[in-house]
Image (spheres, rainbow, N blue to C red):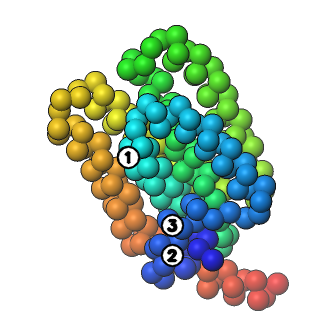
Amino acid sequence: WGANFRSFVLQGQWWRLFTACFIHIGIFHILFNMWALYDIGFFLERMIGSWRFAFAYVIAGLAGSMNSIVFHYATPSAGASGAIFGMFGLFLALLTTNILEKGFRNAMLKSIVPMILFNLLLGTSAMIDNAGHIGGLIAGLICGYLFSWHYKNPRSKFINILSFVLPTVLILASGFIINKKLPDTYLAYEKIMDTI
């Protein structure tokens, strides 16, 4: 149905890295994720614009999916939480620079940092793909710092282009490395399960 699964991805179904960000496992899963997306999107999209928001969302989602298959060799995953963690990471990056008003930064940092830490702690429980969360968070931080560099130098076309090109190159390079270095262990897993 489009879920992220290492064996299928490594056999050429790379589209799963993308589609997994838009499908969910149950009504509560999608409701919780859409509430979180609305919560962060309400502030963030107005700050950075719809195009940058959409770009960072897709990059973070792909990074989360890639990190997920690195750490989970036989577990399918789905959901927007990796991309959403990326949005929180992007917002966190902006809040740690001086492009926003100091009072706003301090107030938001007091709420966003505990929320990120709590959700990462919650993600250590079973059935939650914390690898996807962490991958998305890191990608969001990278996008956030690149975007803040652009906002500090708004007239630089080079920095503006770089803020889109560098995350794209990093995602493509990561995909290439994963494809070449990550073993497809599903067949070995099936053999183990057959002997149990």
Q: Where is residue 122 shown, x and y percent of the image?
A: 75, 43
Residue under circle 3?
A: 17
Q: CA distance from mark 3 to mark 1?
A: 20 Å
Residue identified by numbered label 1: 51
Q: Disc 1 residue type?
A: Trp
Q: Where residue 155 sits in the image (x, y, percent)?
A: 18, 29
Rate crowding at label 3 as few (under 14), some (14 to 19) or many (20 or more) other CA atoms within 10 Å.
Answer: many
Q: CA distance from mark 1 to mark 2?
A: 27 Å
Mark 2 vs mark 3, foreground winner is 3
Q: Is residue 20 above or below residue 85?
A: below
Query: Vertical placement of 47 versus 59: above or below?
Result: above
Q: Which mark is residue 9?
A: 2
**Callout 2 touching callout 3 (CB < 8 Å):** yes
User: Is tag 2's residue or tag 3's residue first in the polypeptide sequence?
Assistant: 2
At label 2, which amino acid type do we have? Val
Closer-to-camera residue (74/98): 98
